[in-house]
Image (spheres, grey):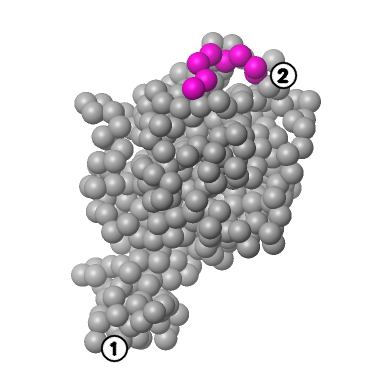
């Protein structure tokens, strides 16, 4: 099973991979250093690190997981994390999987033998964290993890498996923790609403560590509304999962407009959902020398906004602590504070479709953006929809 392709991504995006191109497996840059011996490695991963010159003891660690077809070198070269590490003083660990594990070089987010505490790839990443902390005297209370696509799915799994290790996470076009437990379930998670309540999603997290009472990691979720590899509904499900884990409402505390057609919805200071209007599948970057800019474009690195910068601010990396309570970055352009937010419309499924709030397929109606199922496409079935970010509609029955 470990040598099979990431079934969902392979089936859904074969044409996309042909069009966009597979990220080249370039040799790691000289400043990206491989650590050949980092302890127990049941997941057969490789460890690479970027360490700013003269890094002081007591600094944070960020683990950055590449997406399918990518490498540690790709994520090093394009994500913007090394430049932020120089500015804010922290170490970056870049795990890397291989075609021996998965034919598309995807982290195995859908297999309990790899994505649960003490097992496989998850245990290998934990060993890398331990090695980084031991080598640099890092702050164990400021260890964070982020990743794209399959790396995003593994990020959510790591947050569930090791909430005592990771203080925060950043899920880029990823999936909820433990959405799939077999390769056959993977594509269903990528494309479809799983129709689980927030409490049911949270239970998938808490079941990974029975008896663990917190604290739980703070989570930044990034999702493009035009992503048809990992559908936008996954962003909503991740929001439901981690707000419920934290015991906060799914009603936003505020929303903010950011560069790159991005809207961030805040849920207290625990969870953020970044929705990027029209963006496809990838990590959002913003090449340039501005304070909020970082990264470079490439295969699955898409221009618009520097997701690494805003995620780092949310984690408090820019402040030198992990206790940041204000989640609004300095470049916020507009703010509203009256939850629930966004335009709310009650109408028939037919009217929603005609107005561009939903679409129909096979006689069934689905909300644009979230892809939530709304039932038959006709004038008799009525629902309320709320626009939580431009072009992203969610079911809001009883809220309009």
Q: Which residue is mark 2?
A: 53
Front residue of 169 and 161? 161
Mark 2 Cα shell of 10 Å, populated few (<14), some (14-19), many (≥20) = few
Q: Secondary structure at mark 2?
A: loop
* Rendering quarter of residue 25: top right
Residue 76 image offset from top left, x and y in percent: 68, 35
Separation of residues labelled 2 and 1 (CA atoms) = 64 Å
**Is the C terminus in the top left, top right, bottom left or bottom right quadrant?**
bottom left
Q: Residue at x 78, y 25 (%)?
A: 30
Residue drawn at x 46%, y 27% as measured from the top left: 120
Q: Is residue 171 left or right of residue 48?
A: left
The number of numbered discs placed on residues in the rendered structure image is 2
Residue 42, given in percent of the width and then of the height, sits at: 49, 22
- Residue position for label 1: 379
Residue 62 counted in the magenta span: no
Closer to the chain start, of discs 2 and 1, is 2
Q: Secondary structure at mark 1?
A: loop
In this view, 355 is above or below 270: below
Residue 260 can be seen, yes or no: no
Q: Magenta residues, as a range?
A: 35-42
Query: In the displayed structure, would residue 238 be above or below residue 140?
Result: below
Q: Is residue 38 magenta?
A: yes
- Tag nearer the camera, 2 or 1: 1
Which residue is depicted at the point 43% across and 46% down? 183
| Residue 60 falls left or right of residue 355 | right
x%, y% of residue 339?
A: 31, 59
Q: Nearer the viewer, residue 281 or 115?
A: 115
Q: Residue at x 69, y 62 (%)?
A: 19
**Residue 301 visible within the image:** yes
Q: Are marks 2 and 1 in contact (CB under 8 Å)?
A: no
Q: Quadrant of residue 52?
A: top right
């Amino acid at each position: 099973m470990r040598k099979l392709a990431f079934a969902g991504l392979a089936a859904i995006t074969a044409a996309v991979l042909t069009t966009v191109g597979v990220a080249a497996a370039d040799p790691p840059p000289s400043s990206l250093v491989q650590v050949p011996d980092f302890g127990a490695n049941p997941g057969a991963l490789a460890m690479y690190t970027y360490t700013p010159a003269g890094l002081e003891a007591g600094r944070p660690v960020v683990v950055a997981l590449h997406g399918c077809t990518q490498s540690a070198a790709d994520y090093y070269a394009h994500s913007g994390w090394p430049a932020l590490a120089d500015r804010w003083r922290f170490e970056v660990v870049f795990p890397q999987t291989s075609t021996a594990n998965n034919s598309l070089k995807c982290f195995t987010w859908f297999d309990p033998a790899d994505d649960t505490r003490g097992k496989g790839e998850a245990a290998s990443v934990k060993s890398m964290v331990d090695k980084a902390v031991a080598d640099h005297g890092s702050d164990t209370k400021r260890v964070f993890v982020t990743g794209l696509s399959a790396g995003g799915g593994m990020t959510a799994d790591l947050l569930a498996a090791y909430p005592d290790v990771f203080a925060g996470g950043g899920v880029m076009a990823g999936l909820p923790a433990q959405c799939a437990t077999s390769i056959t379930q993977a594509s269903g998670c990528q494309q479809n609403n799983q129709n689980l309540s927030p409490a049911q999603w949270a239970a998938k997290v808490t079941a990974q560590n029975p008896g663990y009472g917190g604290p739980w990691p703070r989570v930044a979720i990034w999702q493009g509304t035009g992503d048809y590899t990992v559908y936008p509904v996954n962003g909503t499900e991740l929001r439901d999962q981690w707000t419920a884990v934290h015991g906060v409402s799914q009603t936003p505390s505020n929303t903010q407009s950011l560069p790159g057609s991005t809207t961030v919805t805040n849920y207290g200071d625990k969870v953020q959902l970044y929705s990027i209007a029209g963006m496809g599948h990838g990590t959002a970057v913003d090449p340039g020398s501005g304070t909020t800019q970082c990264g470079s474009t490439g295969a699955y690195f898409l221009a618009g906004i520097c997701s690494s910068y805003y995620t780092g601010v949310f984690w408090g990396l820019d402040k030198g602590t992990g206790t940041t309570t204000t989640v609004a970055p300095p470049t916020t352009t507009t703010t509203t504070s009256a939850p629930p937010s966004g335009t709310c419309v009650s109408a028939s499924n037919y009217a929603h479709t005609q107005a561009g709030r939903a679409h129909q397929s096979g006689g069934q109606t689905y909300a644009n953006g979230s892809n939530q199922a709304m039932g038959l496409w006709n004038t008799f079935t009525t629902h309320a929809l709320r626009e939580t970010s431009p072009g992203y509609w969610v079911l809001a029955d009883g809220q309009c």
